[in-house]
Amino acid sequence: MAPLALALAAALAFLLPAAPPTGTSASVVFVVPAADDALSSFGRTSPEPSPPWRVVASHLASRLPGFDSRIRSSVVEADADGSLRDSDGAVRGADVLVALGVGAGAAGALREGS
Protein backbone atom coordinates (compact mmCIF):
# COMPACT_ATOMS: atom_id res chain seq x y z
CA MET A 1 0.00 0.00 0.00
CA ALA A 2 2.89 2.39 0.75
CA PRO A 3 4.28 2.26 -2.84
CA LEU A 4 0.80 3.11 -4.18
CA ALA A 5 0.48 6.07 -1.82
CA LEU A 6 3.93 7.30 -2.80
CA ALA A 7 3.12 6.98 -6.51
CA LEU A 8 -0.16 8.86 -6.01
CA ALA A 9 1.58 11.64 -4.07
CA ALA A 10 4.19 11.99 -6.83
CA ALA A 11 1.49 12.21 -9.49
CA LEU A 12 -0.45 14.83 -7.54
CA ALA A 13 2.68 16.97 -7.22
CA PHE A 14 2.47 17.66 -10.96
CA LEU A 15 -0.93 19.27 -10.44
CA LEU A 16 0.37 21.82 -7.94
CA PRO A 17 1.68 25.20 -9.11
CA ALA A 18 5.46 25.41 -9.29
CA ALA A 19 5.45 28.89 -7.81
CA PRO A 20 2.89 31.30 -6.42
CA PRO A 21 1.31 33.71 -8.92
CA THR A 22 3.36 36.84 -9.51
CA GLY A 23 0.56 38.96 -10.94
CA THR A 24 -3.15 39.20 -11.46
CA SER A 25 -3.18 38.08 -15.10
CA ALA A 26 -1.05 36.86 -17.98
CA SER A 27 -1.25 37.32 -21.72
CA VAL A 28 -0.10 34.62 -24.14
CA VAL A 29 0.18 35.47 -27.84
CA PHE A 30 0.56 32.78 -30.49
CA VAL A 31 2.33 34.04 -33.63
CA VAL A 32 1.62 32.06 -36.80
CA PRO A 33 2.22 32.44 -40.54
CA ALA A 34 -0.50 34.39 -42.32
CA ALA A 35 -0.30 32.15 -45.41
CA ASP A 36 -3.13 29.63 -45.80
CA ASP A 37 -0.68 27.00 -47.05
CA ALA A 38 1.43 27.06 -43.84
CA LEU A 39 0.44 23.63 -42.55
CA SER A 40 1.42 22.10 -39.23
CA SER A 41 2.44 18.52 -38.61
CA PHE A 42 -0.23 18.14 -35.91
CA GLY A 43 -3.29 15.98 -36.31
CA ARG A 44 -1.90 13.40 -38.71
CA THR A 45 -4.36 10.81 -37.38
CA SER A 46 -7.23 13.19 -36.69
CA PRO A 47 -10.20 13.95 -38.93
CA GLU A 48 -8.34 17.09 -40.08
CA PRO A 49 -4.72 16.08 -40.67
CA SER A 50 -2.05 18.79 -40.92
CA PRO A 51 -4.27 21.79 -40.13
CA PRO A 52 -2.98 25.28 -40.89
CA TRP A 53 -0.94 26.87 -38.08
CA ARG A 54 -3.68 29.48 -37.71
CA VAL A 55 -6.20 26.74 -36.83
CA VAL A 56 -3.78 25.12 -34.36
CA ALA A 57 -3.08 28.45 -32.63
CA SER A 58 -6.75 29.44 -32.55
CA HIS A 59 -7.58 26.14 -30.87
CA LEU A 60 -4.80 26.59 -28.29
CA ALA A 61 -5.78 30.21 -27.67
CA SER A 62 -9.40 29.27 -27.07
CA ARG A 63 -8.50 26.45 -24.67
CA LEU A 64 -5.76 28.15 -22.65
CA PRO A 65 -8.00 30.44 -20.54
CA GLY A 66 -9.88 27.34 -19.38
CA PHE A 67 -6.85 26.34 -17.32
CA ASP A 68 -6.84 29.61 -15.37
CA SER A 69 -9.25 32.52 -15.77
CA ARG A 70 -6.36 34.98 -15.34
CA ILE A 71 -4.84 33.88 -18.66
CA ARG A 72 -5.73 35.81 -21.80
CA SER A 73 -4.62 34.50 -25.17
CA SER A 74 -4.72 35.64 -28.76
CA VAL A 75 -3.32 34.89 -32.21
CA VAL A 76 -1.23 37.25 -34.35
CA GLU A 77 -0.29 36.49 -37.94
CA ALA A 78 3.14 37.08 -39.46
CA ASP A 79 3.46 37.85 -43.17
CA ALA A 80 6.11 36.20 -45.34
CA ASP A 81 8.33 39.30 -45.02
CA GLY A 82 8.22 38.96 -41.22
CA SER A 83 5.88 41.88 -40.54
CA LEU A 84 3.21 41.26 -37.93
CA ARG A 85 -0.53 41.82 -38.35
CA ASP A 86 -0.90 43.18 -34.84
CA SER A 87 -3.21 46.19 -35.01
CA ASP A 88 -4.23 45.96 -31.34
CA GLY A 89 -0.68 45.72 -29.93
CA ALA A 90 -1.07 42.20 -28.51
CA VAL A 91 2.62 41.38 -29.04
CA ARG A 92 3.80 44.43 -27.10
CA GLY A 93 1.51 43.57 -24.16
CA ALA A 94 2.29 39.85 -24.12
CA ASP A 95 3.84 38.10 -21.15
CA VAL A 96 4.58 35.04 -23.30
CA LEU A 97 5.08 34.79 -27.08
CA VAL A 98 4.73 31.38 -28.74
CA ALA A 99 5.87 31.30 -32.38
CA LEU A 100 4.44 28.40 -34.37
CA GLY A 101 5.65 27.73 -37.89
CA VAL A 102 7.05 31.21 -38.53
CA GLY A 103 10.43 31.66 -40.11
CA ALA A 104 13.45 33.58 -38.92
CA GLY A 105 12.13 36.65 -40.77
CA ALA A 106 9.63 37.26 -37.97
CA ALA A 107 12.32 37.35 -35.26
CA GLY A 108 13.12 41.03 -35.76
CA ALA A 109 9.48 42.11 -35.65
CA LEU A 110 8.91 40.00 -32.53
CA ARG A 111 11.91 41.56 -30.78
CA GLU A 112 10.80 45.06 -31.73
CA GLY A 113 7.20 44.41 -30.79
CA SER A 114 7.83 42.90 -27.39
Image (spheres, rainbow, N blue to C red):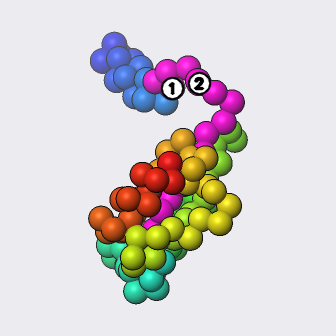
Tell me if 90 is positioned left or right of 83 in this view.
right
Mark identifier at residue 17: 1
- 106 or 102: which is nearer to us? 106
Mark identifier at residue 28: none
Dot 2 falls on a residue whose secondary structure is loop
User: What residue is at 58 percent from the left and 24 percent from the top?
Assistant: 22
Q: Quadrant of residue 52?
A: bottom left
In x, y percent, where is residue 55? 52, 73
User: What residue is at 69 percent from the left and 30 percent from the top?
Assistant: 24
User: What residue is at 46 percent from the left and 85 percent from the top?
Assistant: 36
- Please determine whether, in this image, residue 103 is positioned above or below residue 8: below
Tag 2: amino acid: Pro
Mark identifier at residue 21: 2
**Magenta residues, as a range?**
16-33
Q: Quadrant of residue 45?
A: bottom left
In x, y percent, where is residue 56? 48, 68
> Mark 1 and 2 residues: CB-CB less than 8 Å, in contact?
yes
